[in-house]
Amino acid sequence: MTTLLLHGGATDPAAPVSRAGGLPLVPEGFVWPLCAECEGAMQFIAHLDRGAVVVSVFMCQNEPGLCQEWDPAAGGNRAYVFPAEGLLPATAPAEGETRLDEVSVLTARRVAAGTYGEEDTFGPVDGKDVLGQLGGEPYWLQWDETPDCADCGKEMGFVAQLDRVANFGGGYAYAFVCDGCRRAAFLWQC
């Protein structure tokens, strides 16, 4: 079984659902992340609802390809784990590429067969575009880059794979979480 993430249509920019784009839902005192390379505000990519926690993913798009936004540790992207309760919509900075053009619900749908990423395995499902997968095993385009947690050193757990929701160089993006340390990581390959 594979759990696909389908384009579920447009939604409110601050909807508390899994979605690509819009505004991140964050705890009070949150500071919008800046790219370590260009020092510009990062673009909010996705809000991934995991029940008691959410994962928020950001990536620099101020100078695509120049800020190592594909690397989980180079400072060109950030991923956060927040408790789901008490979150508020963040205010996007006025400068920089901070928001996607479209806000789309990511609807989870379990399907019986196939491996995400294999050529032509999944076309549209129920007439909806497939935008990634939730859980399972990542489909690596190059090699396994599962990150280790910066706090405890253990291998992080796979959360989601994203496709076509942002500029991933024609490839796939991957989100990971260390549940014990409440740390997240994000990277992409093409």
Image (cartoon, rainbow, N blue to C red):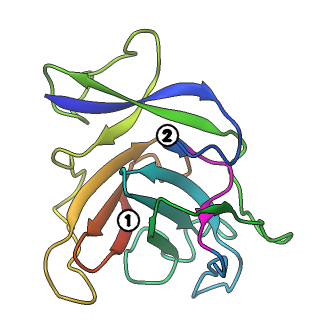
Q: Of the residues shown, which amino acid type is indicated by label 1?
A: Leu
Observer-nearest of 107 and 174: 107
From the image, tell me which residue sits under label 2: 164
Q: Secondary structure at mark 1?
A: strand
Q: Residue furthest top?
A: 126
* Predominant SS of the magenta segment: loop
Q: Position of residue 49 (x, y in %)?
A: 43, 49
Q: Tell me the magenta residue range.
A: 20-27
Q: Of the residues shown, which amino acid type is indicated by label 2?
A: Arg
Observer-nearest of 35 and 3: 3
Q: Secondary structure at mark 2?
A: loop
Q: Position of residue 36 (x, y in %)?
A: 57, 88
**68 is higher (above) or lower (below) than 83:** below
Q: Position of residue 171 (x, y in %)?
A: 39, 48
**86 is higher (above) or lower (below) than 16:** below
Q: Position of residue 175 (x, y in %)?
A: 35, 59
Decide if residue 190 is in sight here: no
Query: Gap between marks 1 and 2, in whole Å?
Result: 14 Å
Answer whether labels 1 and 2 touch (C-beta < 8 Å). Answer: no
Classify mark 1: residues with Cα within 10 Å, few (<14), some (14-19) or many (20+).
many
Left-right relation of 1 to 9? left
Q: Residue at x 24, y 25 (%)?
A: 110
From the image, tell me which residue sits under label 1: 187
**46 is higher (above) or lower (below) than 86:** above
Left-right relation of 18 to 124? right
Left-right relation of 139 to 106? left
Decide if residue 120 is in sight here: yes
Q: Residue at x 45, y 46 (%)?
A: 170
